[in-house]
Amino acid sequence: MRNSIYGGTYMQLTGSEIVIECLKEQGVDTVFGYPGGTILNIYDALYKHSNEIRHVLTSHEQGAAHAADGYARATGKVGVCMATSGPGATNLVTGIATAYMDSVPMVAITANVNLPLLGKDTFQEVDIAGVTMPITKHGYIVKNVEILADTLRKAFHIARSGRPGPVLVDITKDVTAALCEYTPAKPQEMERIDRFTQQEIDQVVELIGQAKRPYIYLGGGAVISGASQEVARFAELVDAPVCDTLMGKGAFDGNSPRYTGMIGMHGTKTSNLGVSQCDLLIALGARFSDRVTGNPKKFAEGAKIIHIDIDAAEINKNIRVDASLIGDLKSVLAAINAKLKPQTHFDWMKQIQELKNTYPLKYDKEKLSCPYVIEEIDRITKGEAIITTDVGQHQMWAAQYYHYTQPRTFLSSGGLGTMGYGLGACIGAQVGQPDKICINIAGDGCFRMNMNELATASRYNIPIIQVVINNHVLGMVRQWQTLFYGKRYSQTVLNDKVDFCKVAEGLGCRAIRVTTKEEFATALGTALILKAPMLIECVIPEDDKVFPMVPAGAPISEVFDGDDL
């Protein structure tokens, strides 16, 4: 180690050692991954720093990507995953795409074959930077050790700046072995992106002042921005009801009288009908997904629309708006709240309350069902758990029946809809938030896809609770087949000989199967006391359905439930 001309110090390090030093610079304490030939040098360097950076060896590279994603969503930090070249790298792709669609900050580090062998169909060679180009904020392939440190620093900055997202850094194996002068550096300061003007703030304040029936539509940007307090204050000042998207869960208190539940395809009747009747819709950190809007031509037809988002590309992309503000939601709302005088909409709020009274969420309470399981989890954990889910009916029920009161407590694949996401994400969340209760809720179809990650949980004694909602079918697809395909159940019946409890026990976890309501509370209590990974299989009827529902492409005002059928 010697003094540098810049007044600091520099060292001769290998590329692999530079990777580890850069991770330490960025405050990385955990990496999820799976080793292989081309990345061996990095793993050898990691071995020497195991007391500073924890490595969690997953059962599959996809599990590593989902775990890094869950870690990032639960902590707000950048998640990191690693994989070797070829199939190791391609196994990360679904996890990277999941993070990209939901704006999750993640850095995926892969190693590739030696530079002279690139482009020659070398063993386990894949152009992973090219493969992931459409699903990353940026991608790098490092062919020169001299730029390695700066590239990694840029990757972390890009991943967490502006609208967050995944960045890929692919490093050729010879670069991981090459020597280079390394100078330590501090992480680049993060700046909030605010492109709004005072004139635009005044325009929004004026529109709010003119509204008689305002509605607030809350998306994942409110969680990412950390704007919960500003959102709560804004809702009080506007005197408006609040609905949210799947990604916006927890940004607004789910127990608040203003809260009307989720909007969209499986949103509440109150939210869907209320937004259809409002005269001003205020979208906060949301992107007007097709699952929210239904038929975009008939979405909030009678309303003026204000859209506040950090990403200028989202403005007028799916829905034309009357006013917009580009910037970090926390900063934007702080500026609006400072200018906005308290509004009063007594008749409107009374109308919304009447909708809530008329159209509550309901289910058959005589039998064991997923909504009952979700409500029991909410009751027993006092709403303080981190809930992860896979994708399907159980995901929608988890969004409907658990009352999320804090951000970063509901982790789910919203944009990509990735079956098999939840277990890896739950492991990552538990590693990142060890003092929290972390529960993954999965359907039997989803659970099959990555259930091997129970071996990861048992290896490290990560005390997650895996709840499998087993209806022996692909529930959401079957629901569509029942309603729209004449009950032709093509390839959606899973009534085979798989025993999830035996699988869990074979992978080193405890397991309990429950078939009655009374058994579930006992099983969950046992899992909470155990403080070790445990599976609870809940056997429910095959034809339970998620309601309310909006048919694909229909206006959200045409929302229906079981009573309507």
Image: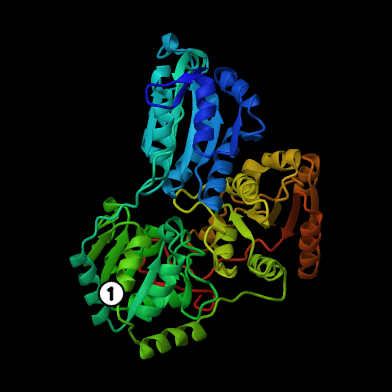
513 over 335 or under it: above or below: above
Q: Nearer the viewer, residue 140 or 157?
A: 157
Is any part of residue 129 visible from this angle? no
Tag 1 residue:
339
Say which of 378 and 565 sits in front: 378
255 relative to 272 in the view: left or right:
right
**Residue found at the very far top of the displayed protein:** 116
Where on the picture, by quarter, is residue 144? top left
The secondary element bearing badge 1 is classed as helix
- Label 1 crowding class (10 Å Cα cut-off): few <14, some 14-19, many 20+? few
Instruction: Specify whether residue 206 is in view.
Output: yes
Q: Is 329 located above or below residue 361 in the figure?
A: above
* Image: 496 above or below 243: above
Residue type of the residue flagged with mark 1:
Lys
Residue at 54 percent of width and 18 percent of height? 38
* Residue farthest along the left direction in this orientation: 199
**Which of 147/325 is in front?**
147
Give the side of residue 451 with respect to residue 420, left or right: right
Q: Residue visible at 21% across and 67% down?
A: 322
In percent of width and height, residue 253 lies at 52, 71
Q: Position of residue 49 (x, y in %)?
A: 63, 28
Is 559 placed left or right of 84 in the picture?
left
Name the foreground residue: 194 vs 497: 194
Residue at left offset 35%, top offset 67%? 334
Residue 441: x percent and y percent? 64, 56
